Image (cartoon, rainbow, N blue to C red):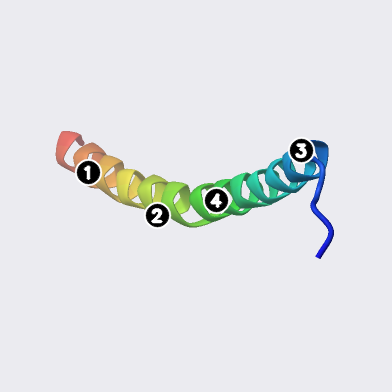
Amino acid sequence: MPQMAPINWLILFLFFFSTFYVIMNLLYFNFIKNLKINFFKKNNMKNYNKFI
């Protein structure tokens, strides 16, 4: 096998790191934030109902 140049390793690392970063951001913003927003909306509605 021919040895790879360091710039190739750098490009591969940046590519995989960027894909991993994008996937983690999509998972975080689509699932965790939506669940938290729904949870806080339910709590706020309950609090407003108690207030009224």
Q: Which residue is mark 1?
A: 49
The CA distance from mark 1 to mark 2 is 21 Å
Residue 42, position in %: x, y?
30, 50
Residue type highlighted by circle 2: Leu
Vertical comparison of 38 with 47: above or below: below
Tell me the mark number nearer the camera, choosing from 2 and 4: 4
Q: Amino acid at mark 4?
A: Met
| Closer to the camera in the image, 40 or 20 | 20
Badge 2, how many Cα within 10 Å: few under 14, some, many 20+? few
Quick one: quadrant of the C terminus? top left
Label 4 or label 3, whichever comes before in sequence order: 3
In this rendered view, identify the residue nearer to me: 20 or 6.
6
Residue identifier under label 2: 35
Mark 3, residues whose alpha carbon is within 10 Å: few (<14), some, or many (≥20)?
A: few
Q: Earlier in the sequence, mark 3 or mark 2?
A: 3
Please name the residue shown 15% across and 41% down the image. Answer: 50
Q: Position of residue 40 (x, y in %)?
A: 32, 43
The location of residue 2, given as percent across then percent down, is 84, 58
Q: Position of residue 44 (x, y in %)?
A: 28, 40
**Mark 4, other Cα within 10 Å: few <14 / some 14–19 / many ≥20:** few
Residue marked by disc 3: 6
Label 4 belongs to which residue? Answer: 24
Foreground mark, 1 or 3?
3
Instruction: Please tell me which residue is depicted at 57% across the width and 46% down the height of the picture.
Output: 25
Which mark's residue is nearer the viewer, 1 or 2? Answer: 2
Mark 1 residue type:
Asn
Secondary element type, mark 2: helix
Q: Is residue 40 left or right of residue 3?
A: left
Q: Looking at the image, is mark 4 or mark 1 nearer the viewer? A: 4
Determine the secondary structure under disc 3: helix
